[in-house]
Image: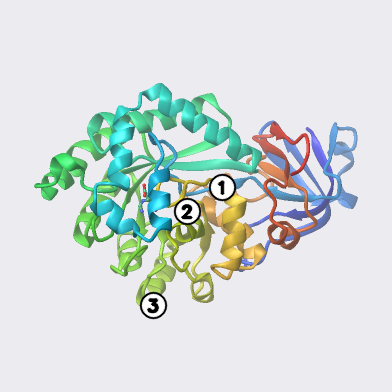
Amino acid sequence: MPVLTNIGYLATCRGNGSQSDLHEIRDAALAWVDDQISWVGPQSSLPLEFSTEPTIDAGGRLVIPGLVECHTHLAFGGWRADEFEMRSLGKSYSEIARAGGGIRKTVRQTRQASKSELLEKSRSHLEAMRRLGITTVEGKSGYGLDRETELRILEVYRELEETQPVRIVSTYLGAHVVPDEFKADRKGYVDFICQEMIPTVAERGLADFCDAFLEEGAFGREECREILETGRAYGLKPKLHADQLSCLQGAELAAEVGAVSADHLEHASEAGVQAMREADVVAVLLPLASLYLGQPAANARRLIDSEVKVAVSTDFNPGSSPNFHLPLAMTLACSLCRMSPAEALKGATIYAAQAVDLQGQVGSLEEGKAADFAIIDAEDPNDWLYRFRPNACVATFIGGESVFTADEVI
Ligand code: NIG
Ligand code: FE
């Protein structure tokens, strides 16, 4: 029954209350038994039974729930640094995609990658992520598109879940783009997703969610609706890449199909925001993608003012966000999306957990939840996200086990 003591600011991040309400406890302590939290409160009220237990001293620092990274395209072959250069010289993301680059280029590279290559590359990213205080990661397929490679990616996620400590959530994103071999037969590809892939993925238990990319050059509204509704019929919960580059009423569609989250939303309509609130769809904002594409970021204020829960994520992928630094995304959520640091923290913990339907297990520091937490070298969330550093995380715990201790804070 170890105890973490001398916590200057404990952000419990309980889900109730407003987005900015962290339900913090100052001068706190946290105790756990096996992999679950057994007590949280002011250190002065620590029950006697804990006083003889081994303690870890947090040094008066900030302690947060383990960060939940709720939107990544974790497993892919190759990189696309050439496109970063092209965009910096003025070419747009869509122009590069139309010329055969973009997602299709990564699809070609991913099809050539072996399972062990994908596994080791993803594993090294997860190791780096847990040093940042990240304890749960969602990973999408979508760079295989054919049966064999999509299943390979999802099997990589399953193997990662079994062989390393970060908790993994898998999402089937067959509807990322129409692959070259189906260029002349879009309907054939949608049928392949609905009739072959979704049933196989569901039967093998390889994913919890089904996602789709609603965009010019990707999939239309009715295609996405059919795919997400089919996924739901097979037990895969819907998610949607919505209104990123243009307004195609993605937020409305996410609400109509009962999506757990709608992600991106830079161009969401007012009616879409209202529909999301009514259907309790979490908005996942991805400011790193806006930064890399040189576009204005989504406005979190109008979502929060409309009582939509806002999660923050990196969108880690080789194109629009080759970066898995979630604390950086949180700082950008403050400066570009207009969230307060407290709102960004709730957005990367309990609301991100809701975006992957794990809010009952992770995302807040409460009795009975997983003992996933990070010690941050800061006084409070304002101090942390304002004074952004390469890594302010001092230690990370998953299920009560230490998975990272910093030699020094950089
Ligand atoms: O979320 N929007 C679609 N997918 C990714 C980009 C993928 C890529 O460029 O490879 C995204 O931004
Ligand atoms: Fe994405």
Q: Which mark is residue 355?
A: 2
402 or 407, which is in the foreground? 407
What's under tag 3, amino acid-wise? Answer: Glu
Of the two numbered discs 3 and 2 in the rendering, the one whose residue sits closer to the viewer: 3
Helix, strand or loop at label 2? It is: helix
Question: Which colour assignment does the render follow?
Answer: rainbow
What's under tag 1, amino acid-wise? Answer: Val
Find residue 260 and report its image quarter.
bottom left
Where residue 17 appears, x then y in whole percent?
Answer: 62, 67
What's under tag 2, amino acid-wise? Answer: Ala
267 or 303, which is in the foreground? 267
Quickly name the residue at label 1: 68
Q: Is residue 221 left or right of residue 84?
A: left
Q: Residue furthest front?
A: 89
Q: Label 3 crowding class (10 Å Cα cut-off): few <14, some 14-19, many 20+?
A: some
Where residue 169 appears, x then y in whole percent?
Answer: 46, 40
Quickly name the residue at label 3: 270
Q: CA distance from mark 2 to mark 1?
A: 9 Å
Q: CA distance from mark 3 to mark 2?
A: 21 Å
Q: How many marks?
A: 3
32 or 240, which is in the foreground? 240
- Are dots 2 and 1 in contact, CB under 8 Å? yes
Q: Is residue 59 left or right of residue 94?
A: right
